[in-house]
Amino acid sequence: MMKLWTVVKREYMQRVRAKMFIVSTILLPLVMSLFALVPAIILNIETPPLRVAVVDQTGKMFAQLKQELSSEPDQATTTTGQNDNTSQRRGFGSRGKFVLDEVSANQPTEQIRATLDQRLNAKELDGYIILPPDFLSSGKADFFTRNAGDLVSYGRLSSALNRAVRQQRLIEANVDTKTRQDLFKPAELQAVRIGAGTQERDSGERFALVFGVGLVMYIAILMYGQIILGAVIEEKETRIAEILFSSVKPFTLMMGKLVGVSLVALTQFAIWGLAFSVFVLYGASALAASGVKGNIPSVPISHYIYFGLFFLLGYFIYGTIYALVGSMVTTAQEGGQLAVPIILILVVSFYLFYPVSRSPDSNFSFWVSMIPFTAPVSMLVRIVTQTPPLWQIALSLLIGFGSVLAIMWVTARIYRVGMLMYGKRASVTEALRWARQT
Amino acid sequence: MPQRSIKGTETLVAFVLFSGINDKRTCMVASEITVKLDRVTKSFGEFTAVKELSLDVRAGRVFGLLGPNGAGKTTTIRMIVNITAPDSGSISLFGHKIDQKTQDRIGYLPEERGLYRRMRVVDQLRFFAELKNFRGRKVEAKIDEWLARVKLPEWKNKRSMELSKGMQQKIQFITSVIHDPDLLILDEPFSGLDPINVELLKDIVLDLKRAGKTIIFSTHQMEVAEKLCDDICLLNRSQKVLDGSLREIKRSFGRNSVAVRCEGGDGVLDDPALVSKVVRHADEAHALLAAGADAQVLLKRLIGSGAVIGKFEMVEPSLNDIFITKVTEST
């Protein structure tokens, strides 16, 4: 045990003291927030408003359409009268504006179209809509544009027109304003979870949490799998392995490495978690003041414990596979190539999220939550949907952590025999034979 | 001869002193044999690396495990340090079966060796000491002592990647002795070292022997082995071809060796009736006389052939001669 501790201590201290650790601890959150910010910034880039002329041959639709476009959430619509529109402030996530221009429909359609085509070619307009006299009954209208590829604007115009025509039809049917508003009120479907005695509201927060845990696990494995791989190969590349094996059992060495690197990972995630909590605590009051609703999901304490346990299970299961790969190769590059399928399995285990959440009690869900590689995500999904009996959760954890030990045992054997025969990458059959050798 | 007996007494005194630390029973048994191999066999698949090998390594002596490349030296050592297990036969250390505890009493410097590149020398040495369950304050003192001994005290806080190759080798050597082992196993310890550092390490090895430590020393450099070893075991093709005290082995080969420096007369030295084996060096030849041949007859024949003789001396065979004779015989 003392020797295990010595190995763990070395792995941990060497890595935590390294500049790389400090740099990545600070830099990664910055990079992550950049990833979150850049798309928002790009989406917010100012584009000139889209100038659309409307030929309203029904004589009733222009006002409705204008209103529907301006009542879009976070959307400001201006008419030709307001030329200072570019200086107008817009909300976050705004996607560009429309400038509507009503064109008199007193002339024949061909003549109007000719004039408008000219304006279109002169780039005074971006497009025009012709609402024919029978538009209210037929619902068919034409949109002429230079840029038919602008699907977003097209979609928005089309849905605004859709709403406008419905309103107008209701008006024509003598439906009063109040009834019209009531008619358009959306329905809200709330999922209510039937628990033991209590009925809890479940508005997807649990799923968000499970997804969050899975995501953190995924990031941890992506980041630290390679480090575990490197740690296992380190003694081969530096040729220290044989000295170590004269002092410590290969299994102790492998375990020490896995635990040491994992403690580094936990340290880093704890630092980020702490920083995040501080940020949330300070930020929450500020957000509350600005009217944003933020609440901690109502999840039983036991679930948080499960989150922790299955996170560790997932991390260790995939971590040991990296160690196994490391034991079979001689250089980190080789290991990197061999490690690609691991990520694939991980991604597959993520997709199980959907079938398992649909029928958490099925045989399929039971089995995937017992297989160590898929258990972490699917068992968590089962826990937050229909909590399975405790024995199932315990069994899943037992199988999982048992597999970690078993894989480490095989890893240690392959590593040792591989070390005794230098310079050769093990094929799978060789690795199996090595595992059986003493 | 008198010098020899003094050495023996020193060894005995040192051994009594050091064995006081260990439990009495171990000491009783270990007083004779430190390492005992009994008909040990080890194969890797089809290939037999070590075959029916029996060895006794006596306490407080330098034991040379010699043999050409691939003779099974490293496999033998790996079994002694408990890295691999023998397929059959038994190995005992300090009178016990090998286990984790006996492992801590061994210092091992393998032929394949290295250091953690980014680790400071002092951390590195402490790590290796702790892996042998040698921990606490005394480690720091030992580290300083050894760094001073190999003349690298100012490198204590440097990372090993900053050290030259020779310096790294000396640090590697310290990793094998830092925990004050009773048995020290060195596999080609001097390869790649400059002559000054070879002398330094040789002196350290002899000091350790004087302090009662048992040293197993594996090499194919016969000149070095000849100067250091008390006992030797010669391996070839997985099997023992010769073992015992170096002195006795040399004596048993007798003075049937002749060092000759002459011009001409090559044909005479190649006559199998007179010379069973000839090894030619740069300026002289070592001829091993054939069974029943007389050196005087050889000398007469040489003169008769018209050779100009610069040197004609009866000598003890060198370890190198013995090595080559035995290896060719058994092949």
Image (cartoon, rainbow, N blue to C red):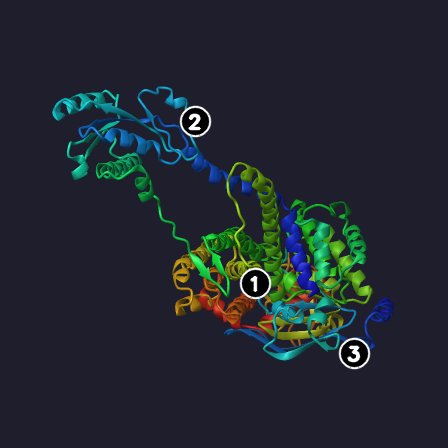
Label 1 to label 2: alpha-carbon separation: 67 Å
Residue type, label 2: Arg
Whether A255 is drawn above or below B154: the answer is below
Label 1 to label 3: alpha-carbon separation: 34 Å
Instruction: Label 2: state its secondary structure.
Output: loop
Give the class, few, some or many, for how many residues have Cα within 10 Å of label 3's Cα (few <14, many ≥20): some
Chain ID at mark 2: A
- x and y percent of residue B25 in the render? 81, 78
- x and y percent of residue B244 in the render? 72, 74
- x and y percent of residue A69 in the render? 32, 33
State which quarter of the image contains the N terminus of chain A.
bottom right
Label 2 to label 3: alpha-carbon separation: 94 Å
Image quadrant where residue B31 sits: bottom right
Which of the numbered marks, if any, corresponds to residue A351?
A: none
Residue type, label 1: Met
Which of the numbered marks, if any, corresponds to residue A89?
A: 2
